[in-house]
């Protein structure tokens, strides 16, 4: 199984997630996760993940790291979220 770890500036989970405490997010069905990351040059990229039912995403708010048990299905330059600038 693929895993990815990103240092994020913004994460967005669709409606197919439950949260346990403040760090564990479990997909209750096939779920989407959007992560915006910023490179060392300040350039933002948006990553889209499709996470299988039952998989758990771990978020470290102290280090802004997100541990994702899935491959990235799409990457776009800029912040492509509703709240972003792109």
Image (cartoon, rainbow, N blue to C red):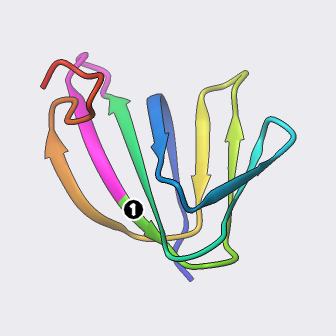
Q: Depth check: 39 or 59 in front? A: 59
Q: Depth check: 2 or 16 in front? A: 16
44 drawn magenta: yes
Identify the residue shown where x is 55% and y is 67%.
3
Residue at the farthest right position = 21
Q: Quadrant of residue 42?
A: top left
Q: Is residue 74 above or below residue 50?
A: above
Residue 25 location (% of width, % of height): 70, 53
Residue 5 location (% of width, % of height): 54, 50
Q: Quadrant of residue 32?
A: bottom left
Element under disc 1: strand
Question: Which residue corresponds to mark 1?
Answer: 49
Residue 16 location (% of width, % of height): 56, 62
State left or right for residue 50 relative to residue 42: right
Q: Is residue 68 above or below residue 63?
A: below
12 drawn magenta: no
Residue 59 location (% of width, % of height): 68, 41
Quadrant of the rendering where the N terminus is positioned: bottom right
Residue at the farthest front position = 15
Sort mark 1 into few (<14), some (14-19) or many (20+) by Cα contacts within 10 Å. many
Q: What residue span does the magenta drawing correspond to?
A: 39-48
Identify the residue shown where x is 67% and y is 25%.
63
């Amino acid at each position: 199984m693929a895993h990815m770890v990103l240092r994020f500036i913004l994460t967005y989970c669709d409606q197919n997630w439950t949260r346990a405490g403040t760090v564990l997010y479990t997909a209750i069905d096939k779920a989407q996760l959007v992560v915006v990351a910023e490179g060392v040059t300040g350039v933002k990229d948006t990553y889209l993940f499709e996470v299988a039912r039952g998989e758990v995403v771990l978020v470290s708010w102290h280090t802004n790291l997100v541990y994702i048990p899935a491959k990235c299905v799409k990457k776009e330059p800029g912040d492509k979220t509703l709240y972003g600038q792109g």
